Structure formats: C-alpha cells, structure tokens
Amino acid sequence: MNKKGFHLAPAASIRLNRRKCVCGIETVIFLCVFLFSLSANAQERVKNVSFHDGMVVCATPDAAKVGLDILKKGGNAVDAAVAVQFALAVTHPEAGNIGGGGFMVYRSARGESNTLDFREKAPAGASKNMYLDSAGNVIPDMSIATHKASGVPGSVDGMVEAYNKYGKLKWVELVQPAIDLAHNGFKITKRLASDLNRNRAQFVKLNTGKSYLLKDSDWKEGDLLVQEDLAKTLIQIRDKKREGFYAGTVADLLVSEMKNGAGLISKADLENYHSVWRKAITGNYKGYKIITMPPPSSGGIALLQLLHAVEKYPLHRWGYNQDSTVQLMVEAERRVYADRSKYLGDPDFYKVPVDSLLNPVYLDARMKSFNWNTATPSTSIEPGNFAGYESDQTTHYSIVDKEGNAVAITTTLNDSFGSKIFVGGAGFLLNNEMDDFSAKPGVPNMFGLVGGKANSIQPGKRMLSSMTPTIIEKKGKLFMVVGTPGGSTIITSVFQTILNVIEFDQDMQQAVDSKRFHHQWLPDVVYQEKDAFSSSTQTKLEQKGYKVVEHGPSGRVDAILVNKAGYLEGGADPRGDDTKLGW
Ligand code: GLY
C-alpha cells in the first residue's frame, strides 16, 4: 500500500502470477493471453478489472483513451478532465460540449475538496416571462428548440478555471487531442449513428449553415465523422484559452448565429461570463463522507436528504429492489422532490435554505407522514416548512489519477444535442439550458419538473440543475467517484448507485448495471426500468397504491470505486457507449 492508500502491485499481474503452468499447451495459451494483455497496454474494457495508477470512466471510448493518455503522460485528474471534456465535445455531440455548462467536484489526494460551478447563465436580455404568450401561457418549445433557449455557455471558462487552479501539463497538450479527433475524424458508434439519424430533421429545420453532423444519406456505424469548423474553434481555445471562445472570431460567430433566430446572447454576456468556485456541501451516511455539489445544483442537497431519510432502516437486510426498500426510497424521493420545487435555485440570486433543508430534525419530521401500509399521495405532500424560512441529455465522467486526486464532472447541453442549433462556422451546438428555469410557476419543464420563484428567470441567473457529481470518502480515504446524466433522474440514479455498493454489496460495475427506478413527487408515478422490480415486488407496491410505470433506460452512471483491496475499479454504464480505462 502506498501512502495514498492504493496498492502498488497491478491486480491483473497478481492474478496472472498465481496461475500455475502445468503443461506445454496451457503454458503457450497462457503466455499468448498474457502478451496480448500487455500489448493492449493494460487498457481494458472488460468487467471487474482493477488498476492502481489511475482510471477514466466516460461516455465514449475515444474520450476515455484521451483521458488515460494524459494520465500516463504524468497529467493529474484535472488535466485529464480538461482533455476529456474537449474530447467529448467532439465524440459525444449529444451532450459533450463547449456550448453548454456543468459542475466539477474535486477531491485532492490530501483530502481537500472544492467544487466549480460552470453552469450556463441567463443572458442579460432574459426576463421572467420571456416564454409566455400574451395570455400568460408557456409557448411550447420556445425554451427548448429556438435561439432563445440557450444560456451563456460556461464549459470553456470552467475548463480554463479548473486548469489554472489545479492543472499540471501544458494547456495545449490537453486541447490538442480533441482538435485531432475533430480534424482527422473518428469512427462513430452504432448509437451515435442512430442518434444523428433520429435528429436529422430537427438539424435541418433549425439550421441555415453547414453542419458536419449532417450528411445526405443515413449515418452508419463506423462512418468517419470529421468536424473541421469545430477543429478551428478548438484551435482558438488551444491558443487563446478563455479569449479563444468568449472574444474574437468564435464570439463573433456565436453572436451572429443569435441574430439568425432573435437569440439573446450578446458579446457583453460572453465577456461577463465567469464560473464560480463554491464550497462543497458534505454529509455523512453510516460513516461515509459524501462530498457533493451545492446550488445551483439541487442534486447535492437532494442526495443528502435522501440518504438521511433511509439511513436508519435495514436496507442491507431487506435487499436490492425488494418492496420495503423501494417503498422507503420512493417515499423519501417524493418528499425531497417537493422541496426541490420550492426552495432550490441559484444561490447568487435566491437565499437557498441549505442548513434548514439538511437539518436532521426537519428531515425526520418530513418522513413522519410515511405509512408502510399505503402510498402517500403526492397531492398530500407540499414542500416542507421550517422555522425561520422566509418566504436526456447530459454526460458525466469520473477520473482518479496516480496520486489519488479525484474529479467528478457532469456537463450538459440539456436536451440531446441541446437546442440542435449549431453556431454557424464554429461547428458547435448550443445548449437549451433555459428550459431548466421555471418558465411559469407549476408548469413542468421537459423533465416534468415544476418550480417557482427560487428558479424563476432573471438576467445573469443560473438555472437550477439536477446534476449530482459526487465523491465519497471512507475513513478519510477516497472511496467512490460517481455521477450520471438523466435530467430529473440524475439524483435518484446516483442515490441508488451509492446504496447498491454500500448496502447491497455490489461491485462498481454491478452497481452501475443494476436496474433503476425513479419517483419525483410529480407526476405521482414510480418509473421503473424494464424488469427493475420482480413481479412480486411490483404487485406488493401496487397493492399499496403505487402506480408503477415502465420507462426506458435511466441515466448513464460512470463511476470509480476504491475496492476493498485498495484498487481502482470502474463502472461504465452499459446503457451507453460508456468506457472505463485504467492503468
Ligand atoms: N439539464 C439537466 C440538469 O442540469 O439537471
């Protein structure tokens, strides 16, 4: 064990050394396998392989390789994160981005934690009722698929800030791999081909300029995707860092694109955009320290509320997705999402009552109305009251470096491919993050989430998020790095993944693979992934009044665990092209 708590001997080679070679043919086969594994530089996408020198788990194989190469060059977790962010902007256009925003949770090998908020902001020209018609009704799709749907992007500033504070390698080394991927192209996966084909009509409808994501015939798995305009934009960022995006040619192109659709982002909005370092919020669950994202994410507070609500119950004895386990978790989720709708927003504009929301006395009182015999109807649950209070698509990556520094970043364009509007000539997609604001109290956004004053639109304000990048410590040492995309389901997916490991003894990959369920107060429905519940669990829940509805895959959790033996073990979500690479 080295001083960071990681074992120094590679797990794979230990296993190989134990293997006895008893006959000739076995020896030859064994050596072939061994040499093959060496030739692959110990980079493996297979299950249950653990590493000691670093690990990257993210949404695409190409971006994971970029991150691992940076770690191997001596870069730290933040260096690798910057390189992965830009590589995802090229290889995962659904959500990887330079035109969106996100959050980073960081924990150094020495145990210091920090978070960076590079969430998009409402442009100065935005206003509370900007998505309402003259009768006061929300105009469908205006906050989703128009030039007015975009917040001022934060990702590039976020990467520069993170790098300036923690980066070690040269900035150009971190951006160049993405430029190469954009310029030389990369082979697209079956999933990306199908995502591109499915969105073709929208791309054509919403754009006037050339897009490298469009071609005359359908995309097929293995096609080479070259993005010359994006490569040029990335070169500006490589050479001028922040100024390469928020000023000069790229800023000019972005503002001129806004004019194509009465969009609001101005040169001044770009110049004025700055990400913010915020103190992590922390909590405890059965001795594990949870380090997570504060507002404007709702995710961190909600996660801590959920963990507190279930902590005193014997989940381990009840078991994974058994009826008591599910009932308790659903009732906690119902109450937590009700709180989210009222109290969570941008702390720079709205006094989020963090301490009250996390007060154990308040949280225990919230669960008092829970009745084992019957589902609590959501209509009977209001956001809580406490004394003294005045009134699918995102992506996540987890990285650990050789020293034991850890990064959890969740970043987003909001919807898949954001607003689906490209900045003409600059080759990147714009977010539609403005839909994460509450356009009108009580009217659900695209994720069915409702909100009010705390999350109303104001110029310069950040829209509320559910992104929940999280790092967990056990006995003062790194234990887990976790997060996921998935809109409103982000919080519940992270919650379940953590419980899968801590309560249900699943390894990291199992915990990520395991079927998930979700409840968000409104609508009053328990969504389950196909076969998440056994028929007996489902029947018992339905008999108590729970409405169980099957829905598609929930989230794409990418996580790293320091396992009992002290090795790094990855969980890459099989619901996507997600990849884990280590060394
Ligand atoms: N755009 C999804 C979220 O931030 O929660």
Image: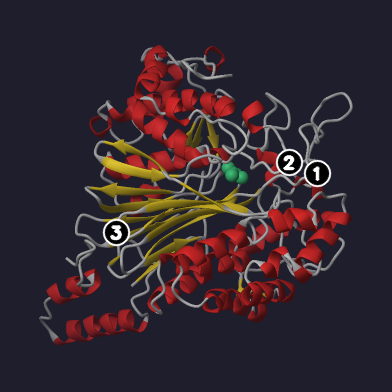
Marks 1/3 in contact by CB < 8 Å: the verdict is: no
- Name the residue carrying label 2: 459
Q: How busy is the neighbourhood of tag 2: few (under 14 within 10 Å), some, or many (20 plus)?
A: some
Q: Nearer the viewer, residue 20 or 305?
A: 305
- Give the vertical position of 87 relative to 346 (above or below): below
Dot 1 surroundings within 10 Å: few (below 14), some, or many (20 or more)?
Answer: some
Task: Give the colouring mode of the picture.
Answer: secondary structure
Q: CA distance from mark 1 to mark 3?
A: 43 Å
Numbered mark located on residue 125 in the image: 1
**Location of the N terminus (image quadrant):** bottom left
Residue at the location (56% across, 40% down)? 296
* Residue hosting label 3: 110
Indicate which disc, 2 or 3, sits on the residue closer to the N terminus.
3
- Quick check: is the Cβ at mark 2 less than 8 Å away from ligand 1? no
Residue type marked 1: Gly
Q: Is residue 171 left or right of residue 360?
A: right
In the rendering, which numbered label is found on residue 202? none
Dots 1 and 2: beta carbons under 8 Å?
yes
Tell me where residue 52 sits by quadrant: bottom left
